[in-house]
Amino acid sequence: QKEVEQDPGPLSVPEGAIVSLNCTYSNSAFQYFMWYRQYSRKGPELLMYTYSSGNKEDGRFTAQVDKSSKYISLFIRDSQPSDSATYLCAMSASTGGFKTIFGAGTRLFVKA
Amino acid sequence: NAGVMQNPRHLVRRRGQEARLRCSPMKGHSHVYWYRQLPEEGLKFMVYLQKENIIDESGMPKERFSAEFPKEGPSILRIQQVVRGDSAAYFCASSPSGFRENTEAFFGQGTRLTVV
């Protein structure tokens, strides 16, 4: 079993839809949870990060962490064609764990 | 302030040759991380370096791979005697402090290595 599981998609939605992206994980030591966006042939860029459980909102993006279920989500409201990219969840432990474990990424297509 | 610079962007090597991948971190960043990304897979941590020190190399294959971050100049990921399985995108990231403080790490655009 992988430490982090993420559905690779692709996920195709119409413009304006609400997008839900999810990851599950197995390591209860993870404390930091991140979402990265990666456009084709580019490096990942950090979108959101949260510490421990809870929600965090930034514009059209909301990140949720449920540590009891070992489940994290990223919601995108009013999705735009420019949101078309691969979204990678990532997580790391709090106790000096320099490794960040990435999910395989979900490819999202937002159709105009 | 330039971002993380990686070069070359694309590198083709024949089996058995050496590949050298370079990463210049963002100005003021002294922490560098290397990741490998295979098609349809997430980024896999390889090594974490500070200037002149390897902090964590638990993700590095034991043979043929090495990394350095000298006092002057870019960080180098070296792959000796490349094999077809080394074909991947290699990303470098940098941060001003250690990742454990969850300081944002900025990624370069990657080097795509193709072994023929």
Image: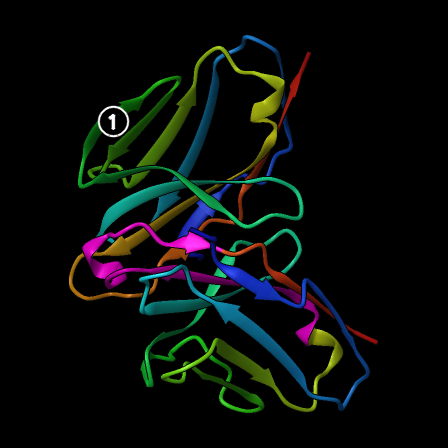
For the residue marked with disc 1, what is the amino acid?
A: Lys
Q: Hey, which residue is sitting farthest front in the picture?
A: B1
> Which image quarter holds the C terminus of chain B?
bottom right
Question: Can the viewer see residue A3 in this picture?
Answer: no
Q: Residues within 10 Å of mark 1 (few under 14, many from 20)?
A: some
Can you say whether A44 is above or below B56 in the image? above
Tell me the residue at 63%/19% (across/down): A81
Helix, strand or loop for disc 1: strand
Q: How is the image coloured?
A: rainbow
Magenta stretch?
A: B86-107
Can you say whether A104 is above or below B38 in the image? above
Q: Which residue is mark 1?
A: A56
Chain for disc number 1? A
Locate residue B109: give its quadrant.
bottom right
Tell me the residue at 41%/52% (across/down): B106
Tell me the residue at 40%/17% (across/down): A60
**A73 inside magenta stretch:** no
Q: Position of residue B40 (x, y in %)?
A: 63, 51
Locate residue B41: give its quadrant.
bottom right
Q: Nearer the viewer, residue B97 or A69?
A: B97
Q: Position of residue B12 (x, y in %)?
A: 78, 73
Q: Nearer the viewer, residue A99 or A27?
A: A99
**B95 inside magenta stretch:** yes
Whether residue B72 sits left or right of residue A93 in the image: it is right
Tell me the residue at 73%/82% (across/down): B83
